[in-house]
Image (cartoon, grey):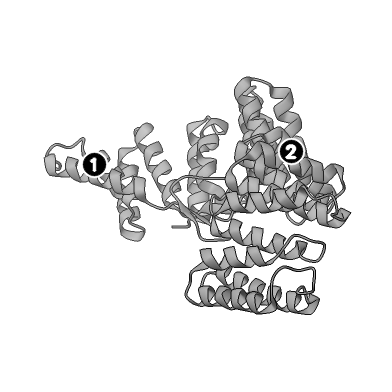
Amino acid sequence: MDIWLFLLILSAILIGWLLGRWQPFNKNNVQHPDLFTEKYARGLNYLLDDDSDNAIKIFTDLVEVNQETIGIHIALGNLFRSKGEVDRAIKIHQNLLARPNLTRKERHLAIAELANDYLKAGLLDRAEKLYREMIELNADRQLAYRRLLDLYITEKSWEEAAECARILYKTGEPEANLIYSQCLCEIAGDAVERGNNRLARSSLDKAIEVDAGCVRAALILIRLHLKTDNTASAKSIFQRLIQHSPEYMPLYIKPARQIYNDDRAYREFLQNQHQQHPSTALAIALLEHYVRIGDIEQARQFLSDTLNKSPSFEAFEFALRFLKSDPDQLGETWENLSVFLKALREKKTEYVCSRCGYESNAIQWLCPSCRNWASIKPIKI
């Protein structure tokens, strides 16, 4: 049974209990008690037959909007939304807001639910307006800022998202520092691309201030320093990054090539890191470096060790490219195999979310599955 159907059954029971307790069938009520009982029984039968459309229609007709049934209408609207019938949910919640006899608390609740309807329907501008109204009315501001934060992240409105995250961070919201720092990284990354180094630097400094372990901020800061020829500062940050967050090593290889621009220093870096944190990415980087500096014999030896100890698609693909220089060893079959291995490599999972297990072949700082920031990390091979 779907969760929304379970909730609907509970609502039906609640409706029957409340209406029975209120005794609505007095001389001013046009419905006869027997008629109400019949309709209510039919509604329950529809539920048992999984005919939720007719069940909801009957329960909606049975409950007139008054001071005592507002909560039930809110519940029915939410059930429509959970089922995907957002238009019906919107109509119910709009109807509630149009009534002049709502208490302050009831009006705030109706506004919140209508905003959720708009959000589910993709009417982001209307949802944003109502969440802003909730903040102005001091109606569950924390919830409103959380919803606005998700909305702005969806729209990639990073300035607005960062402001919401900052407010939640100041109020002690769990993990708000992580989200705030990632929003600042988005702003910094865009600023670097536009050449606005001042904005990028201030955003990155703030990101690291609120989340000292923000790998992404450190990587962008390294890129910024390298772009401005400040290699010493880039190297200092880089060394701290390696020490505190070695699990992101595949992301460090590219900046390392720029930081250690001396062939010997770069080779020692790769060798030391591969010895401490062996991985396919480091092995391939080291193999490519041997070939680039012309140390072919060392490349052959290391390739043989790699294929024996930790074979991988990447290692075999490199072997095919490396051995291709010897026409006596390779032919058309090896070339086809190289293409095949490259295709497999593109489909290979290289990153996984530590929170929900979402798999990806590229780094994503915001997990599209569980929507946690910085939870996707390279797989150790």
The residue carrying mark 1 is 339
Q: How many marks?
A: 2
Of helix, strand and loop, which one carries label 1? helix
The answer to which of 39 and 259 lies nearer the viewer is: 39
Which residue shows up at 78% across the image and 45% down it? 210
Q: Visible in this render: residue 59?
A: yes
Sort mark 1 into few (<14), some (14-19) or many (20+) by Cα contacts within 10 Å.
few
- Which SS class for mark 2? helix
Question: Going 70% across and 65% down the picture, which residue do you hit?
Answer: 63
Residue position marked by numbered label 2 in the rendering: 129
Of residue 119 and residue 354, the one placed in the foreground of this image is 119
Label 1 vs 2, first from the N-terminus = 2
Which percent across, then down, holds residue 340?
Answer: 23, 46
Q: Residue at (75%, 42%) from the top-left corner?
A: 130
Q: Is residue 292 above or below residue 251?
A: above
Q: Label 1 amino acid?
A: Val
Residue 180 point in image, percent of width and height: 73, 44
Residue 365: x and y in percent read: 58, 45
In this rendering, position of residue 302 left or right of residue 127: left
Where does residue 160 sit, x and y in percent of width and height? 73, 35
Asked whether, in this view, residue 22 is left or right of residue 355, the answer is right
What's the CA distance linking mark 1 and mark 2? 53 Å
Q: Quadrant of residue 166?
A: top right
Q: Residue at x 54, y 49 (%)?
A: 368
Residue nearer the viewer, 171 or 138: 138
**Marker disc for residue 269:** none
The amino acid type of the residue labelled 2 equals: Lys
Q: Residues within 10 Å of mark 2 (few under 14, many from 20)?
A: few
Vertical position of residue 302 compared to residue 25: above or below = above
